[in-house]
Amino acid sequence: MSKKCKQKNYITALNVFNEAKNFLILSKYADEKSKEFSSDGLSISFASARNVNLAFACELFIKSLIMIEKDNIVYGHNLYDLFNKNLSQQLRERIKAEFDKFSTKENLNTLLIKHNDAFKNWRYFYETDKKYIEFFITDMQVFATILKNICSQILNDNIITKKD
C-alpha cells in the first residue's frame, strides 16, 4: 500500500492486529478442544468459543486494515459490511483472489453474508433455542489466515509519517 498512515493510527492498527492474532490463537485452541471432547457432549461449548473467537479475529483484522487504509476507526461486528463498505476495492480484490485459491465451500461474499452476524449469533448461542447455526469453519479459518498475512505484510511495509 502506498498510502501512509499517521503514527498514532499505525500504532492503534498494530495493537488491533495483535489482539486479532490472540483471538485467532484462542479459536485454534478451542477448535482442538472441541475435537478432543466431541464424544462427551462438551464440544458445543468449545465450538461456540471457537466460532466467536474466530469471527472476532476476522473482524479485528479487517478493522486494522481499515485503520491503515482510511486512517479511520469503525465500529460494529458485521463482517460483510466491514469488509465491503470500508476496504478499498483493490484490497478486497487482493483478499478475494487469495481466498479463491483455498476456499472449500463458498465464494468470499457468500461466506461473509452467511457469517455477517457470526460473532453476535455464536456469542449468544446459549440464549437461543437453536440447536445449530451454520458455520463454515474451514473457510473462516482460511479467511482469517489470509487477513492476518495481508495485514502483517501491509503493517510491515507501511511507512509511518511524522505526527502532525
Image: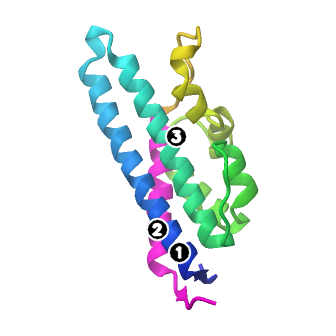
Q: Is residue 115 magenta?
A: no
Q: Position of residue 24 (x, y in %)?
A: 40, 46
- Can residue 103 be spotted in the picture? no
Residue 120 falls left or right of residue 43: right
The numbered disc on residue 27 is none
Q: Using the image as rendered, state which of residue 154 and residue 94 is in the foreground.
A: 154
Residue found at x 49% / y 65%: 150
The label number, if any, that marks residue 55 in the structure image = 3
> In the rendered image of this protein, does residue 50 appear above or below residue 38?
below
| Position in image of residue 13 (x %, y %) | 52, 67
Question: The residue under label 2 is which amino acid type?
Answer: Leu
Prevalent SS, magenta region: helix
Secondary structure at badge 3 equals helix
Pick the front one: 71 or 47: 71
Which residues are the magenta region? 137-164
CA–CA distance in space, label 2 to label 1 = 6 Å
Q: Amino acid at mark 3?
A: Ala
Q: Is residue 149 left or right of residue 63?
A: left
Residue farthest along the right direction in this orientation: 85
Residue 157, magenta (yes or no): yes
Residue located beneath label 1 in the image: 10
Which residue is found at the position 55% from the left and 62% from the top? 64
